[in-house]
Image (cartoon, rainbow, N blue to C red):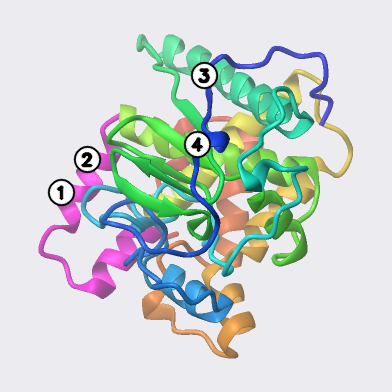
Amino acid sequence: MLWRGRRQSDNIEDDRSDSGGGGIGGGGGQFQLPIGGRTGGGGSILLVILVVLAGWYFGFDPSAILGGGDGGLLPGGGGQISDNSGGQGSGTAPANDEMKQFVATVLAETEDTWTGIFKSQGLTYEDPKLVLFSGQVRSACGFASAAAGPFYCPGDHKVYLDMTFFQQLDQQFGASGEFARAYVVAHEVGHHVQNLTGIMSKFNQMRQGMSEADANQLSVRIELQADCFAGVWAHYTAQKGILEQGDIESALNAAKQIGDDTLQKKMQGYVVPESFNHGTSQQRQTWLARGYKSGKLSDCNTLSGPI
C-alpha cells in the first residue's frame, strides 16, 4: 500500500503512555472481545480464543456492542501480546513512530471514502476517533485488555487499537502485510458506519430475547457486513492507485485466518458451528471480496437472505 506522504488523520488519540500493562485482565462489561470479555489472569491462548469464539464481538457488553470483536475484527485473544513497537508496550510511545503514521493514514483514507459515500446519499459522515492504547484501556463500553484485540465502541464512537496486535496478526494468525493491517482498521470503521446508520441499534434490539444460537447467527451477519464495508473502502482506495500487487490478497488471507472455523480447528481440533459469531473463513473472504468488487453498499446486505 502506497501510504507514505498521504494525509494523516487528526482523529488519533494516543493513550499509550497512559495505558496499563499487558495481560488479559478481564473487563467489565462491554465491548471487549467475545462474549464474556473476562479471562481472569491466566494467559492461555486457547482459553482466550475459546472465549473469543464464544462471543467474539461482544467483548464488553453483549447488549451494548455489536457482536464481534465488539467492534473487533478478530478475536484478538492470545494471552499477553508481545511487544514489537520499540517501547510502546511499556508506555513510552514515540511521538511519531511509523506504525502510528500508517494507522493515521489508513484512518484518513476511510474518512475520505465514507464522507464521499454518505454525501452521495444526502447524509453527513461523522469521523470516528481511533484510540491507540497499550495493555489495557477503558472506553464508554467498559474495560478491555490488549488480549481482546481491536474493537469499536458505539457508546463513544471510537475505535480502540493496541498496535502490538499487528505482530500477533502476523506471527500467530499468519496474516502478514500492510493491507492486512489496513483491513483491521477498515473493519472496525465498518462497525462505526453500522452505528451511524442505525444498523447496530437494530441489531441489539433484534437480539433481545433470542437464544444464544440465534444471537450468534445474527452476530455473524453483522460481522460479515463490516467485512463487506471494509471491502467497499478497499474498492475506492484501489481507484486512487495506492494499492500494490498482493494487497487485496493480503487482506483476504487475513479474513481467512480469523474465520470462526479456522480458529476453532486450529485451537481445539474441531469446530462447533452453532458457536460461530463472526463467520467462517469462506464467508469472511466472500463478503470482503464482494464489497471490494462492487463498491456498493447495497451489495452488503447481510441481514436478510443467505450468507
User: Residue 201, which numbered label?
Assistant: 2
Image check: 302 left or right of 214? Answer: right
What kind of element bears circle 2? helix
Above/below status of 255 relative to 257: above
Q: Which residue is mark 4?
A: 18
Instruction: Compute the Cα span from label 4 to label 1.
Output: 35 Å
Q: Outermost residue, left direction?
A: 209
Q: Which residue is mark 1?
A: 205
Foreground pick, 279 / 195 = 195
Image check: 255 left or right of 307? Answer: right
User: What residue span does the magenta drawing correspond to?
Assistant: 197-220
Of discs 4 and 1, which sits in the foreground?
4
Looking at the image, tell me whether mark 3 or mark 2 is earlier in sequence order. Answer: 3
- Kindly identify the residue that appears in the image at 66 percent across and 50 percent down: 164
Mark 3 nearby-residue class (10 Å; few <14, some 14–19, many ≥20)? some
Q: Which residue is mark 3?
A: 11
